[in-house]
Image (tube, rainbow, N blue to C red):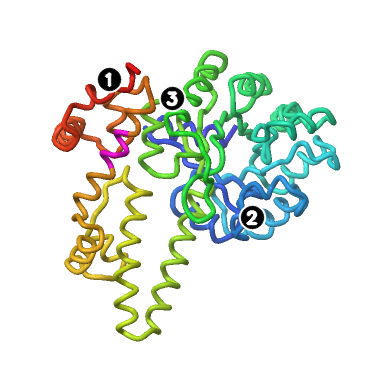
């Protein structure tokens, strides 16, 4: 299959596959221009562009399949020519004949399908009620199997080992571990699994893949992994071959850009003294918020000052006056506190992994700083909690 061949060539050349969920022509065009290997046309992407949660896809606000078909044909195809498009299929829709609708998807020009919205993300009594009346994950498995029969590329969202086995038997070309809604930003999930839990879940699922179908492509979908450092952590610690981003590639960048740009223009219309007063507060808050969201990445204070539209020396002075310590001291303290929390709560994690999770790629430097400011080595600190 052509799509499989394209993605396999990326992996064979030493790269990872990058997929982006799109809900509009502009996000699709920019994701494609940025190098996305595959685009997922999902109703969740459309709802995010509307300012709503991705979980809006699960409510009766619109007909999911009709919506995806409509904006896919009207908005995405006209602006994206060379990147494969996957149709986000709600296979449990009782109003469609699966085989006939899959033929419509293929005729429209989509390269394949992905099972979204998926029953796999629903749990509790609501899941039980849905299954009692026949709305089950089995319907999604059947869709993947039928799509393969029609020579459509197939990506399967899974959340556990049993779903993985079923999708492998159905012939899925890609197994994508769905790690839940993406954290971060204004509309991001407030409750999500830890990056370590995400790693453990992915490892179990990918082990099933390697045992039953070694050639299947293995990917992860966002959840707690919304930064480059998160993605690298999962790549280095699992057999992952690719990353799918939804909010990571549309909502979060849009939130930041629009909010900061409008704020800048709004301040530009105010009295100079008022602008100065607000800038001091906003700039300091901006730096602290940025550190909280990006402490795993390399952070340049000079670039932060430029982004806040203020001089580096002035921002440095204001930050120390308001926070009480310098930027570098604050960043160091933040990362060390993150490392301490990880060592306190995650019993089986190595000190080296804890360092990486706290934003330190140099373990020797991490150990040195930890001992200097905490008063003991990371391993000794961890022992106090593992022995409880």
Q: Quadrant of the C terminus?
A: top left
Q: Position of residue 279 (x, y in %)?
A: 32, 72
Question: Can you tell which quarter of the image residue 208 is in?
Answer: top right
Picture residue at 19% right of the left edge, 51% below the top: 328
Disc 3 or 2, which lies upstream in sequence?
2
What residue span does the magenta drawing correspond to? Answer: 335-340
> Is there a contact, CB below 8 Å, between mark 3 and mark 2?
no
**Left or right of 312: which side holds 340?**
right
Residue 228 in the image: above or below residue 136: below
Q: Which residue is mark 2?
A: 47
Q: What residue is disc 1 on?
A: 383
Q: Tell me: residue 95, above or below residue 214.
A: below
Q: Please give the count of numbered marks on the rendered protein.
A: 3
Mark-to-mark CA distance, 1 and 3: 30 Å
* Residue in view at x 28 percent, y 41 percent: 335
Instruction: Kindly report the distance in space between the C-alpha atoms of the residues bearing marks 3 and 2.
Output: 32 Å
Q: Give left or right: position of 327 versus 180.
A: left
Looking at the rendered image, the disc whose residue lies closer to the viewer, 1 or 2, is 1
Q: Indicate yes or no whether the magenta region holds residue 338.
A: yes
């Amino acid at each position: 299959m052509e799509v499989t061949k394209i993605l396999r060539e990326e992996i064979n050349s030493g790269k990872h596959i990058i997929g982006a969920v799109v809900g509009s022509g502009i996000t699709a065009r920019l994701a494609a221009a940025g190098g996305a290997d595959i685009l997922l046309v999902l109703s969740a992407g459309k709802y995010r562009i509307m300012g709503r949660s991705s979980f809006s896809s699960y409510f009766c606000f619109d007909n999911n399949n009709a919506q995806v078909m409509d904006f896919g044909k009207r908005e995405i195809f006209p602006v994206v020519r060379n990147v494969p498009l996957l149709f986000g299929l709600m296979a449990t829709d009782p109003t469609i004949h699966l085989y006939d609708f899959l033929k419509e998807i293929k005729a429209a020009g989509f390269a394949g399908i992905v099972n979204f919205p998926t029953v796999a993300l629903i749990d509790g009594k609501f899941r039980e009620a849905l299954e009692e009346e026949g709305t089950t994950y089995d319907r999604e498995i059947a869709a993947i199997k039928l799509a393969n029969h029609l020579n459509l590329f197939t990506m399967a969202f899974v959340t556990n080992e049993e779903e993985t086995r079923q999708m492998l038997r159905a012939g899925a070309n890609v197994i994508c571990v769905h790690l839940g809604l993406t954290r971060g930003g204004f509309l991001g999930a407030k409750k999500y699994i830890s990056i370590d839990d995400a790693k453990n879940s992915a490892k179990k699922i990918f082990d099933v893949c390697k045992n039953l179908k070694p050639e299947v492509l293995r990917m992860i979908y966002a959840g707690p992994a919304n930064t480059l450092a998160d993605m690298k952590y999962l790549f280095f610690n699992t057999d992952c071959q690719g990353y799918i981003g939804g909010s990571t590639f549309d909502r979060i960048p849009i939130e930041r850009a629009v909010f900061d740009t409008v704020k800048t223009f709004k301040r530009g219309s105010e009295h100079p003294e008022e602008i100065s007063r607000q800038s001091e507060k906003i700039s300091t808050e901006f730096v602290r918020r940025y550190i909280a969201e990006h402490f795993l990445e390399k952070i340049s204070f000079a670039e932060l000052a430029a982004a806040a539209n203020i001089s580096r020396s002035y921002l440095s002075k204001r930050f120390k006056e308001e926070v009480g310590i310098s930027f570098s001291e604050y960043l160091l303290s933040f990362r060390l506190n993150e490392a301490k929390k990880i060592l306190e709560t995650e019993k089986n994690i190595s000190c080296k992994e804890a360092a990486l999770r706290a934003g330190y790629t140099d373990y020797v430097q991490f150990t040195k700083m930890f001992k200097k400011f905490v008063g003991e080595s990371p391993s000794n600190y961890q022992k106090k909690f593992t022995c409880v």
